[in-house]
Image (spheres, rainbow, N blue to C red):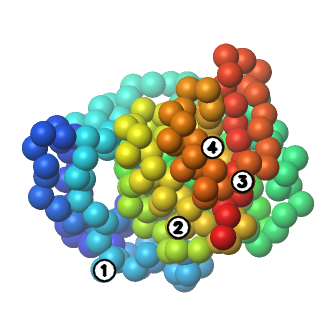
Amino acid sequence: MQIQPLATHRPSATRRPAAAPSPQEPTDHYVVFGRESAEIPAAIADVVCPAQMKLGGFPSQRWVVTPEIEAFHRQHISTTPEEKLRDGPNSELKTLIGPMLQTRYTHTQGITVAELGPSTSTTVAETLAHGSNRYIGVDLSEPLAEKQIEFLVAGGAEQFFNVKGDTYALPLQSNSCDLILTSCHPPFVSSTLEDRKLALDEVHRSLKPGGEFLLFPYNEKAQPPEFQAYLADRFELVERRLSPLGAERCAVILQKRP
Ligand SMILES: C[S@@+](CC[C@H](N)C(=O)[O-])C[C@H]1O[C@@H](n2cnc3c(N)ncnc32)[C@H](O)[C@@H]1O
């Protein structure tokens, strides 16, 4: 599986302490998939930002995929049995998110779907990347993206694309996606309030008017009131479903307000 960089400069993502603000380090994004092209494919040129558009630096103490973490991912992929890298039958991707997507979007065609931080998971792409729909996986970890691509190719999926990108500075054009999803994604589960708002802004910017955001897990009671208000200003709740695992682990579908 080839990885085609859109530019030669490699991202130098690091985790930086808040006390030592980092210089702005622009990073290029990459289109990664098994096709022989260093260009953004025409099929997603209206969605993915052009190569010359640099991602932002890493100004805050947020979780990003460092070279060390990528090295760990590469080792993990090479030493873990494939069954364990795939979405298990009892995973919430299979028991909660897949069924939710099937109920709400099965009959929808012509939509552009972006999944943030899919890792090696395939449920979302397998459920939605059919017909005239387009699926774009956005992740910072190349080894995980490579494995996801391998699984999707083996499963016969066609309408999928993978872009190397940071959720805090999405390489997606404004008003370009019908649906954005995240499951167990650090920018929404283990981030500071400010970073969570930044990630939410990026999702809001990238969605078309009326576009939808599936966020999992989301537990309102555990969210600071400031984040709840921030979210309510930008999105309307249209669906909530509790995980079979309980523990207030909800998946919510939020519709972008104009
Ligand atoms: C815990 S895995 C989630 C896997 C999958 N979505 C699931 O539910 O099983 C987190 C994923 O998010 C990616 N990731 C973490 N921070 C990111 C960021 N700032 N931008 C893009 N991807 C990021 C990681 O590389 C990893 O693939």
Cα–Cα gap, marks 1 and 4: 30 Å
Q: Which residue is mark 3?
A: 236
Mark 2 or 1, closer to the camera: 2
Picture residue at 43% right of the left edge, 62% below the top: 170
Check disc 2 and give the amino acid type. Arg
Q: Residue 35 at x, y = what percent?
A: 48, 68
Front residue (pair 20, 4): 20
Indicate left or right for 123 with 139 as reference. right
Question: Which residue is pictured at 63% across the width and 43% down the height?
Answer: 215
Residue that numbered label 2 is attached to = 205
Q: Quadrant of the N terminus?
A: bottom left
Where is residue 53? Give x, y as percent.
Answer: 33, 77
Distance (Cα) linking label 2 and label 4: 16 Å
- What residue does disc 1 label? 52
What's the amino acid at mark 1? Gln
Give the mark, 1 or 3, whose residue is nearer the N terminus: 1
Residue named by callout 4: 215
Q: CA distance from mark 2 to mark 3?
A: 15 Å
Choose mark 1 or mark 4, whichever is in front. Answer: 4
Please state which amino acid type lies under the numbered disc 4: Leu
Name the element at disc 3.
strand
> Which mark sits nearer the N-terminus, 2 or 3?
2
Q: Are marks 1 and 3 in contact (CB under 8 Å)?
A: no
Q: Residue at x 54, y 67 (%)?
A: 206
CB atoms at circles 2 and 3 under 8 Å apart? no
N-terminal-most mark, 4 or 3: 4
Residue 28 versus residue 155: which sits nearer the camera?
28
Label 3: few (<14), some (14–19) or many (≥20) C-alpha neighbours in 10 Å: some
